[in-house]
């Protein structure tokens, strides 16, 4: 398939040419969690054909977004990982996640959620303002694996880390259930809590987990739409001219 090329001299156009094809950004998302084999990517993405995945990886490699290397023994397998150019996309993925929340409807029964996706979401939507002094260990369960996340709130906002910290409580739950707990749509102290959600330690602290996150679409670092001058420096329509 020929490479898409728009006849426009614009950096956003160049970015769309590289990242705009189906599956490409999701491939990049997966590699933010670490090096992956081709089979790992295909299994996690779900629905992408081998030929399409191979083409997307090849183009990303040609553009210098990702690199391919061989793992040392005993693994001795080929993996893909982000190059510096690929890692530079992190702020863009953060803002895309914030923007995408606007369109999140209730999940369908066939919708999947990987623990690593939720961990990224926790980093994006952790509160940046002062919160309760809470320290929790959140164990996100997947199919045959789990991701451990430690969150600590305080005057400086919420820290999300993979490094172990002294936690008041541990919550273990599948990814979708953990999301509902972090949003506040489910509480660990509810009488109808499913048996597959486990809580150890201070149950009162665990019940406050939603206080540590704000799953709002409004980014904290991007100017409000419509604010500021136009590109030529003049005030926007309707703004006072001083």
Image (spheres, grey):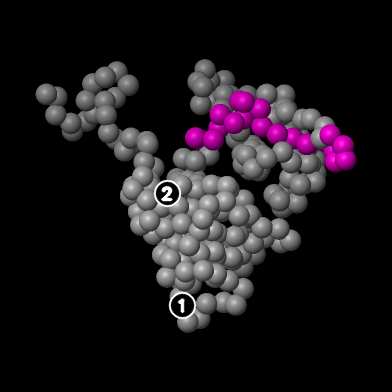
**Residue mark closest to the camera, 2 vs 1:** 2
Residue, disc 1: 190
Q: Is residue 157 left or right of residue 8?
A: left
Q: Quadrant of residue 82?
A: top right
Residue drawn at x 18%, y 33% is 238
Q: Secondary structure at mark 2?
A: loop
Give x and y (percent) for residue 146.
66, 58
Whether residue 156 is visible here, answered yes or no, is yes
Give x and y (percent) for residue 203.
47, 71
Quadrant where the N terminus sits is top right
Whether residue 121 is visible here, answered yes or no, is no
Q: Name the disc covering residue 71, or none.
A: none
Q: Is residue 229 above or below residue 92?
A: above
Residue drawn at x 62%, y 39% is 32
The residues bearing labels 2 and 1 have C-alpha atoms spaced at a distance of 25 Å
Dot 2 or dot 1, earlier in sequence? 2
Residue drawn at x 73%, y 45% is 41
Q: Secondary structure at mark 1?
A: loop
The range drawn in magenta is 72-92
Q: Is residue 115 left or right of residue 159?
A: right
Bin the neighbour count of mark 2 within 10 Å (Cα to Cα): few under 14, some 14-19, many 20 and up.
many
Residue drawn at x 53%, y 39% is 93
Q: Is residue 172 magenta?
A: no
Residue, disc 2: 158
Bin the neighbour count of mark 1 within 10 Å (Cα to Cα): few under 14, some 14-19, many 20 and up.
few
Give x and y (percent) for residue 90.
54, 35
């Amino acid at each position: 398939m020929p490479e898409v090329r728009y006849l426009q001299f614009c950096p956003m156009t160049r970015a769309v040419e590289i990242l705009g094809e189906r599956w490409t950004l999701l491939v990049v998302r997966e590699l933010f969690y670490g090096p992956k084999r081709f089979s790992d990517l295909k299994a996690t993405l779900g629905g992408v054909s081998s030929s399409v995945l191979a083409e997307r990886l090849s183009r990303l490699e040609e553009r210098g977004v990702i690199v391919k290397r061989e793992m040392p023994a005993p693994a001795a397998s080929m993996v893909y990982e982000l190059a510096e150019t690929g890692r530079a996309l992190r702020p863009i993925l953060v803002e895309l996640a914030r923007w995408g929340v606007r369109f999140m409807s209730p999940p369908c029964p066939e919708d999947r959620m990987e623990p690593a996706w939720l961990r990224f979401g926790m980093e994006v939507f952790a509160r940046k303002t002062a919160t309760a002094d809470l320290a929790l260990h959140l164990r996100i369960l997947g199919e045959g694996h789990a991701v451990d996340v430690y969150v600590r709130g305080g005057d400086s906002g919420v820290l999300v880390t993979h490094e172990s910290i002294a936690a008041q409580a541990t919550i273990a739950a599948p990814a979708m259930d953990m999301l509902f707990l972090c949003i506040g749509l489910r509480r660990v102290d509810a009488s109808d809590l499913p048996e597959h959600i486990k809580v150890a330690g201070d149950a009162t602290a665990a019940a406050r987990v939603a206080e540590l996150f704000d799953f709002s679409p409004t980014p904290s670092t991007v100017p409000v739409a419509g604010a500021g001058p136009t590109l030529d420096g003049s005030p926007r329509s309707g703004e006072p001219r001083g």
